[in-house]
Image: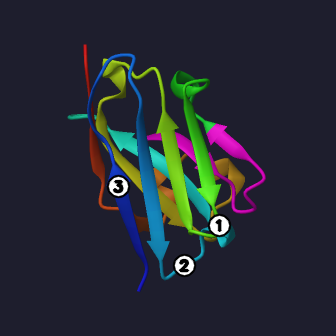
Amino acid sequence: QVQLLQSGGGLVQAGGSLRLSCAASGLTFRSYAVGWFRQAPGKEREFVAAFSRSGGYTYYTDSVKGRFTISRDNAKNTVDLQMNSLTPEDTGVYYCAADRTIILSSIRDFRQYDYWGQGTQVTVSA
Protein backbone atom coordinates (compact mmCIF):
# COMPACT_ATOMS: atom_id res chain seq x y z
CA GLN A 1 0.00 0.00 0.00
CA VAL A 2 1.35 3.39 -1.00
CA GLN A 3 1.59 6.01 1.68
CA LEU A 4 3.11 9.48 1.65
CA LEU A 5 3.68 10.78 5.15
CA GLN A 6 4.37 14.46 5.61
CA SER A 7 6.08 16.21 8.48
CA GLY A 8 7.14 19.73 9.24
CA GLY A 9 5.19 22.92 8.81
CA GLY A 10 3.77 25.11 11.51
CA LEU A 11 3.62 28.78 12.36
CA VAL A 12 6.40 31.21 11.51
CA GLN A 13 6.81 34.95 11.22
CA ALA A 14 7.32 36.59 7.86
CA GLY A 15 10.92 36.26 6.77
CA GLY A 16 11.34 32.98 8.59
CA SER A 17 11.97 29.47 7.32
CA LEU A 18 10.31 26.10 7.48
CA ARG A 19 11.15 22.69 6.11
CA LEU A 20 8.61 20.15 4.96
CA SER A 21 9.39 16.50 4.48
CA CYS A 22 7.54 13.79 2.59
CA ALA A 23 8.43 10.16 3.26
CA ALA A 24 7.17 7.39 1.01
CA SER A 25 6.33 3.80 1.69
CA GLY A 26 5.14 1.39 -0.97
CA LEU A 27 6.87 3.30 -3.75
CA THR A 28 10.35 4.51 -4.60
CA PHE A 29 10.55 8.24 -5.20
CA ARG A 30 13.38 7.99 -7.72
CA SER A 31 10.96 6.33 -10.13
CA TYR A 32 8.27 8.96 -9.69
CA ALA A 33 7.69 12.60 -10.38
CA VAL A 34 7.22 14.26 -6.99
CA GLY A 35 5.55 17.57 -6.46
CA TRP A 36 4.61 19.96 -3.71
CA PHE A 37 1.32 21.81 -3.88
CA ARG A 38 -0.47 24.19 -1.58
CA GLN A 39 -3.99 25.30 -1.00
CA ALA A 40 -5.08 28.49 0.67
CA PRO A 41 -8.60 28.83 2.10
CA GLY A 42 -11.13 29.35 -0.66
CA LYS A 43 -8.57 28.85 -3.40
CA GLU A 44 -7.70 26.05 -5.75
CA ARG A 45 -4.73 23.83 -5.03
CA GLU A 46 -1.69 25.32 -6.73
CA PHE A 47 1.67 24.03 -7.84
CA VAL A 48 4.74 24.94 -5.81
CA ALA A 49 7.67 22.77 -6.88
CA ALA A 50 8.44 19.40 -8.42
CA PHE A 51 11.05 16.90 -9.44
CA SER A 52 10.76 15.18 -12.79
CA ARG A 53 10.63 11.39 -12.74
CA SER A 54 14.28 11.16 -13.62
CA GLY A 55 15.10 13.65 -10.91
CA GLY A 56 17.13 15.54 -13.44
CA TYR A 57 14.83 18.53 -13.59
CA THR A 58 13.25 20.70 -10.95
CA TYR A 59 10.39 23.09 -11.42
CA TYR A 60 9.15 25.97 -9.31
CA THR A 61 6.28 28.34 -9.51
CA ASP A 62 7.53 31.87 -10.11
CA SER A 63 6.51 33.20 -6.70
CA VAL A 64 8.81 30.81 -4.83
CA LYS A 65 11.85 30.81 -7.09
CA GLY A 66 14.96 31.73 -5.15
CA ARG A 67 13.20 31.13 -1.83
CA PHE A 68 12.11 27.48 -1.90
CA THR A 69 14.24 24.45 -2.68
CA ILE A 70 13.00 20.95 -3.40
CA SER A 71 15.41 18.14 -2.63
CA ARG A 72 15.38 14.39 -2.65
CA ASP A 73 17.16 11.78 -0.54
CA ASN A 74 17.04 8.47 -2.36
CA ALA A 75 18.53 6.54 0.54
CA LYS A 76 15.77 7.72 2.88
CA ASN A 77 13.12 7.79 0.15
CA THR A 78 12.12 11.30 1.11
CA VAL A 79 11.50 14.58 -0.68
CA ASP A 80 11.87 17.82 1.24
CA LEU A 81 10.81 21.38 0.61
CA GLN A 82 12.98 24.02 2.24
CA MET A 83 11.12 27.29 2.45
CA ASN A 84 12.99 30.51 3.20
CA SER A 85 11.97 34.17 3.32
CA LEU A 86 8.39 33.17 3.91
CA THR A 87 5.61 35.69 3.41
CA PRO A 88 1.96 35.62 4.50
CA GLU A 89 1.08 34.77 0.90
CA ASP A 90 2.78 31.39 1.42
CA THR A 91 0.17 30.43 4.01
CA GLY A 92 -1.82 27.32 3.22
CA VAL A 93 -2.01 23.58 3.49
CA TYR A 94 0.93 21.99 1.73
CA TYR A 95 0.72 18.61 0.07
CA CYS A 96 3.30 16.33 -1.45
CA ALA A 97 2.26 14.17 -4.37
CA ALA A 98 3.77 11.51 -6.56
CA ASP A 99 3.04 9.98 -9.90
CA ARG A 100 4.85 7.42 -12.00
CA THR A 101 3.49 8.22 -15.45
CA ILE A 102 3.09 11.98 -15.48
CA ILE A 103 4.54 13.82 -18.45
CA LEU A 104 6.62 16.95 -18.06
CA SER A 105 4.00 19.22 -19.61
CA SER A 106 1.56 18.18 -16.87
CA ILE A 107 3.90 18.26 -13.91
CA ARG A 108 2.29 21.44 -12.56
CA ASP A 109 -1.25 20.00 -12.77
CA PHE A 110 -2.35 18.57 -9.42
CA ARG A 111 -5.06 16.53 -11.17
CA GLN A 112 -2.39 14.35 -12.78
CA TYR A 113 -0.95 12.98 -9.55
CA ASP A 114 -2.11 9.67 -8.15
CA TYR A 115 -0.65 9.63 -4.66
CA TRP A 116 -0.96 12.33 -2.01
CA GLY A 117 0.30 13.10 1.43
CA GLN A 118 -2.06 14.04 4.23
CA GLY A 119 -1.29 17.74 4.05
CA THR A 120 0.39 19.99 6.56
CA GLN A 121 -0.49 23.52 7.60
CA VAL A 122 1.96 26.35 7.01
CA THR A 123 0.99 29.68 8.54
CA VAL A 124 3.11 32.78 8.05
CA SER A 125 2.23 35.75 10.22
CA ALA A 126 2.90 39.31 9.15
Residue located at (44% from left, 54% from top): 21
Disc 1 target residue: 74
Evaluate if marks 1 and 3 touch, with contact meaning CB atoms under 8 Å apart: no
Judging from the image, what secondary structure is the residue with disc 1 in?
loop
Disc 2 target residue: 27
Q: Nearer the viewer, mark 2 or mark 3?
A: 3
Disc 3 target residue: 7
| Residue 72, placed above or below residue 77 | above
Q: Nearer the viewer, mark 1 or mark 2?
A: 1
Res 15 quadrant in image = top left
- Marks 1/3: CA–CA distance: 17 Å
- Residue interval drawn in magenta: 45-59
Q: Residues within 10 Å of mark 3 (few under 14, many from 20)?
A: some
Kind of residue sitting beneath label 3: Ser
Judging from the image, what secondary structure is the residue with disc 2 in?
loop
Magenta stretch contains residue 112: no
